[in-house]
């Protein structure tokens, strides 16, 4: 089965946790550790988490990864 990858990013709020939790509930798996960085232009912390998922259809560049 093909494996797809996406990086979930969001400001450091509960919304980030909700987005990652939603992905996990849809079968995505954590890939590596989360990351945080300060966005100096906006004055906020940003979070990121890579996730992967096996899918049955071949990968296409026009896929909406969050909808898989």
Image: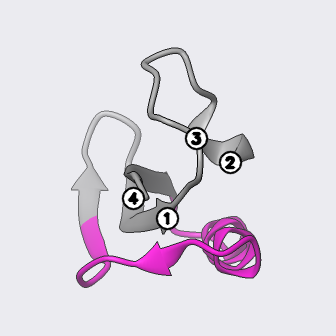
- Tag 3's secondary structure? loop
Q: Along the polypeptide, which appears first: circle 3 or circle 2?
A: 3
Q: Which mark is residue 57?
A: 3
* Residue to which mark 4 is pinned: 46
- Tag 4's secondary structure? strand
> Is the residue marked by circle 3 packed among few (<14), some (14-19), or many (20+) residues within 10 Å?
few
Q: Nearer the viewer, residue 2 or 16?
A: 2
- Distance Cα–Cα, label 4 vs label 2: 24 Å
* Residue to which mark 2 is pinned: 68
Q: Quadrant of residue 34?
A: bottom left
* Residue to which mark 1 is pinned: 53
Identify the magenta region: 11-36
* Viewer-side label of 3, 2: 3
Could you tell me which residue is drawn at 38 percent across and 48 percent down?
43
Could you tell me which residue is drawn at 63 percent across and 30 percent down?
64
- Distance Cα–Cα, label 1 vs label 2: 8 Å
Asked if marks 1 and 2 touch (Cβ < 8 Å), the reply is yes
- Distance Cα–Cα, label 3 vs label 2: 10 Å
Q: Is residue 37 left or right of residue 5?
A: left
Tell me, yes or no, whether the highlighted magenta stretch contains residue 52.
Answer: no
Q: Position of residue 7 (x, y in %)?
A: 39, 53
Q: Is residue 59 left or right of residue 68?
A: left
Image position of 64 with respect to 44: above or below: above
Q: Nearer the viewer, residue 4 or 21?
A: 4
Asked if marks 3 and 2 touch (Cβ < 8 Å), the reply is no
Q: Position of residue 9 (x, y in %)?
A: 46, 53
Q: Along the polypeptide, which appears first: circle 4 or circle 1?
A: 4
């Amino acid at each position: 089965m093909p494996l797809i990858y996406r990086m979930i990013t969001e400001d450091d709020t509960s919304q980030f946790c909700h987005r990652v939790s939603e992905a996990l509930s849809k079968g995505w798996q954590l890939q590596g550790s989360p990351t945080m960085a300060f966005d100096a232009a906006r004055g906020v912390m940003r979070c990121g988490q890579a996730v992967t998922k096996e899918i049955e259809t071949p990968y296409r560049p026009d896929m909406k990864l969050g909808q898989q």
